Image (tube, rainbow, N blue to C red):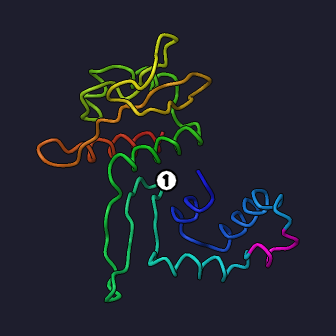
Amino acid sequence: MGIFKFIKSKILSSKLVVEIKKELRAELNQEGAEDEYDLGLNQEGVQNEISEQDFIVGKSDFFEGIDVQFDSNEDGLITKKYKPIGKFVRESLDDLIRFELLDSNEVNNLQKIDYSKQILGIQYPFLRKVRISDVGKIERYWKKPVEIDGASYYVCSEWYEKEPNNDRPYFERWLRRIKKT
């Protein structure tokens, strides 16, 4: 995840600003910036830059399973909206992989159509192991595979959030369960 997507997906706290500075220094050090002011890394500068983008808080709270963004409109009113389900699934899965929360049993279950349908409400296995014979894009799966415990998997791209086929509640329930274990 790029640093600016990372910033937009988190609430800025003093602790987070320190982490942001470290990551920005690492990414931008090769451009010859000499100190944090050359990089624009003072805490207020980071917060002001983000708030100028008509962006109050974007939070995909990893440990709570919340997928909410708050935006301000031209009247200054704050509105609540959810990320599109595909983006939410992709970002959540990236987090689960990064924090190593998917055990081998769950990865095996996610490759089964019955489990994926019952638990996630989707019509295809959530994960499909990459095969040597795979050429080009695999239908109904995202083009870029993910790596889990050294193996590559395609992730199902068939996610809907309109009735009568709303997959969001299923995915959110599963995500909360995985995070609790």
User: In which quarter of the view is residue 150 placed?
Assistant: top right
The magenta stretch is 33-39
List x then y, in percent, for residue 54: 44, 78
In this rendered view, identify the residue nearer to me: 11 or 46. 46
Q: Residue at x 57, y 21 (%)?
A: 151
Residue 48 vertical position relative to residue 19 in the rendered view, above or below: below
Q: Secondary structure at mark 1?
A: loop
Left or right of residue 45, residue 55 in this image: left
Q: Is residue 96 left or right of residue 140?
A: right
Give the answer, above or below, for where 79 lies relative to 140.
below
Amino acid type, mark 1? Phe
Residue 167 in the image: state x and y as whole percent: 25, 42
Image height of 27 relative to 175, above or below: below
Q: Residue furthest bottom?
A: 75
Kindly identify which residue carries mark 1: 63
In the displayed structure, 3 sits above or below 107; it is below
Residue plotted at (38% across, 24% down): 138
x and y, in percent, of residue 50 in the image: 55, 75
Q: Quadrant of residue 49?
A: bottom right
Tally of numbered discs: 1
Few, some or many residues within 10 Å of mark 1 (<14, 14–19, 20+): few
Tell me, yes or no, whether the highlighted magenta stretch contains residue 34: yes
Residue depicted at 84% across the width and 69% down the height: 33
Q: Residue visible at 34% across and 80% down?
A: 78
Q: Quadrant of residue 55?
A: bottom left
Q: Is residue 65 left or right of residue 164?
A: right
Q: Residue furthest left?
A: 164
| 162 horizontally vs 143: left or right | left
Residue 180 sits inside the magenta stretch? no
Residue 64 locus on image (x, y percent): 44, 55
Taking the view exactly as shown, the residue that stands out farthest to the front is: 136
